[in-house]
Image (cartoon, rainbow, N blue to C red):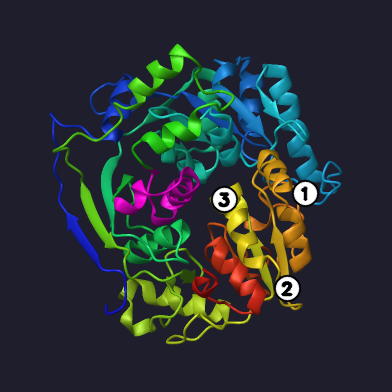
Amino acid sequence: MAGQAQTKVDSKNTSSTEARSIVEKIWDSHVVGQLEGHPAIFAVDLMLIHEVTSAQAFQTLDAKGLKVFDAKRLLGTIDHSIPTRQNRWEIYDESAKAQVEALRRNCKNHGIPFLDFDKGQGIVHVVGPELGITQPGMTIVCGDSHTSTHGAFGSLAFGIGTSEVGHVLATGCLLQQKPKSMRVEFKGRVKKGVFAKDIILRLIAEIGVGGATGHVIEYVGEAIRAMTMEERMTVCNMSIECGARAGLIAPDQVTFDYLNGKPHAPKGKAWDEAVKHWQTFVTDEGAQFDRKIEIDLSVLKPMVTWGTNPGQGVQINQPIPTVKSLPEQEQGVAIRALEYTGLTEGATMEGTPIDWAFVGSCTNGRIEDLRIAASLLKGKKIKDTVTFYVVPGSEAVMFQAQKEGLPEIFEAAGAQFRMPGCSMCLAMNDDKVPEGKRCISSSNRNFVGRQGPGSITHLASPATVAASALEGKIASPEGYF
């Protein structure tokens, strides 16, 4: 389509026993055993746990009299259900309070490292990388779908269910089927005002929410190589939104520079040995993939979702597709999405009035995201009709933001800088968008009621969120750069 990022798709079911992809290398090194026709017994190097999906798993262990297999392979934190107001330790919701207390108790009883309030707390997929616990070549799981974030480091990371959390607690292993592989190459470089969030939203809009089902995506290309680790985490984070099991990027010097000096990264001679090992996690020349996709980013504009899933997205200056132009199986979903969001087919997203704005989440709650938002807001005022929450992804991000004077910029602009947590990404805590109100959000999902019953969510980059808050309507950030 004229004016859109050009896409080339090549679907070939091929395999190779000689050259291997990163996924195959990690898979092969973690299969403990496998009987023909059965799932593999798959070793897990690290499991991250939070308050929402762990309680029943610990109950299962206790009921069976089992002990945690290896507490050193675990890390707990609180993020989903907690408040982000200043007195956040006072949890008013009784169910949320019970979840937090249960995780504290379970981590203490089983000797599991736990990041509590004022002790390194943060969103589960933010704290792992910033501590240097997330490392190339690892297998990482969590009872959270956006565990794919950690794939930015060249690890195989994916979400699991509560019963599987129990399996890893007890054995350090899972039963897994080997996934298919997909190679996504982003060609060219983006223009100013276009960010990693726009790139991944473009992919999801192109292939749909089920386009990568059963696959692990390896992201390659000039744009990927030029990305910071924060940007790579944003891309891998939303791999799950196009149906992928996981997404990953080959580790390189950018990866090593990010990890060097982190609290849990190897030191001294061990560092040199680790880097030498990590450098082996690259896809061999000639390795085959089950599917390949190419997307040209040179003409990409900022992306915004118009519907009720992340695949319903368009470039900000382009029209919402007409229902008849969509595949027949998507037309009913589109009709219901337009009814829910109150939008019209053929209209552009740019100029749509908003009531709320949110920068944060495991997708875009890192220090780089906050810096981008602050750069747009500095010396300006958001529209007085807009409520704007800026929520750091961890205490470490919060402290760095404070050191750089970012909270003062946000507050002066009329935004609220809050305490770390998942916050308005999902309606599991105090931070909710009121019914019928429209929010532009840097989070990862725009499902019906995701940010609060009856709320309307449009996904975008932190820059687009900040520009929209300033103008009181969905606006491109391009002119601010």
Q: Is residue 139 left or right of residue 337?
A: left
Q: Which residue is mark 1?
A: 83
Mark whose residue sits in front, 1 or 2: 2
Q: Residues within 10 Å of mark 2 (few under 14, many from 20)?
A: some
Q: Look at the picture and state if 237 lies above or below 129.
A: below
Q: Look at the picture and state if 120 lies above or below 325.
A: above
Dot 1: element: loop
The magenta region covers 222-247
Q: Which mark is residue 261?
A: none
Q: Looking at the picture, how far across and down is residue 286, in whole percent?
A: 13, 38
Q: Amino acid at mark 1?
A: Pro
Q: Which residue is mark 3?
A: 368
Q: Which mark is residue 381?
A: 2
Q: Looking at the picture, how far across and down is residue 143, in whole percent?
A: 55, 38
- The residues tagged by marks 2 and 3 sit, at their Cα atoms, a distance apart of 21 Å
Picture mark count: 3
Residue 224 lies within the magenta run? yes
